[in-house]
Amino acid sequence: MKWVLYRFLNRHVLPHHGLILRKYATDGDDAADSPELLARQDAALAGLLSHWAAAAGFAGAPDEAGMAAWVAEFREVHARRPIRDNKGGAGFNSSLCLWLTARLAQPRAVIESGTFQGHSAWLLRQALPDAEIVTYDTVPENLQLRLPDIDYRHGDWSADDAAPPSAAPADTLLFFDDHVSHARRLREAVARGYPLALLDDDVPADALYATGWPPAPSLSMLFDPDLVPGQEVAWRRNGRRKQLILSAEDLAVRDLVAAHRHLPDLAPVNRYGSNRGMALVRLRPPAS
């Protein structure tokens, strides 16, 4: 009962007064407090991220020293986040990966599917002050933060008849954090001519139990050589058995992917939560 009241106050009452109840410290609040140790940690994070950025094809990515400066800058951004308790959403490491990817890609527009409380849309605005941002969610009641220069839309992005961002698809970054099948989302992206997508919660077939709503078939499942059409993939979560049957249509989505690369897991460095399998995908243009 106390937890229900806590969630109700945090989501529907206190944000209107600029307040929030905090039951526990969240990622980023507990941290090393010696400048030398924090700098050492930033350098370790930068080493992983600069290697990933170069391998992911970002030609203008900073070197390790420059990336360490970016990580230090992100710490300042994250410290002033308006939503302090984002349980169920992005923690420090996921937020860093999203902010960094947006900074590297420098799109003129971002389309996000999965607004939740509004933290990630706020974070995208910090990374891209001038970009057009459109964010979708089918449960708008969760929204805590609404910025005047972000377009918040209720519903599924694929069913929206409203005008898309004015930027061309080639200048747009898609961010899918909505627990909908990655196979479906990538098909939709290709059909609309979008070449770049960031996927969250990319769980492999043998770990679908790790989240309540896995976006299955996930990107990792599409490239799993042991999975074939018609195969049952089953898992248990909270005592309930769940399953899906892989379709040839879903597995064929791998042919739409030109390249993909997972962001590094930063948890071994700072012991915060994992980035939950975030992956950047470059898509092939639609067949003529």
Image (cartoon, rainbow, N blue to C red):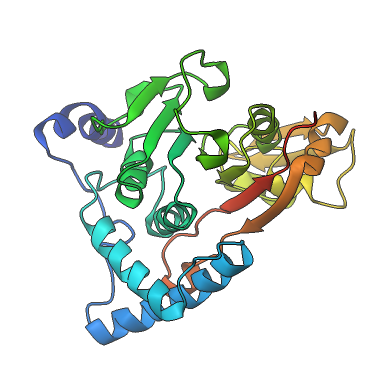
Report the number of discs.
0
Q: Is residue 261 left or right of residue 98?
A: right
Rendering quarter of residue 234:
top right
Question: Which residue is most to the bottom?
Answer: 36
Q: Quadrant of the N terminus?
A: top left
131 vs 267, left or right, is: left
Residue 232, percent from left and from top: 84, 36
Q: Relative to 171, say whether 35 is above or below.
A: below
Left or right for 160, reference 88: right
Q: Residue at x 45, y 28 (%)?
A: 165
Q: Quadrant of residue 51?
A: bottom right
Whether residue 260 is visible to the viewer of this picture, yes or no, is yes
Looking at the image, residue 107 lies above or below residue 117: below
Q: Nearer the viewer, residue 226 or 106?
A: 106
Q: Quadrant of the C terminus?
A: top right
Name the side, left or right, on which 239 lies relative to 149.
Answer: right
* Coordinates of residue 14 in the picture (x, y in percent): 15, 33
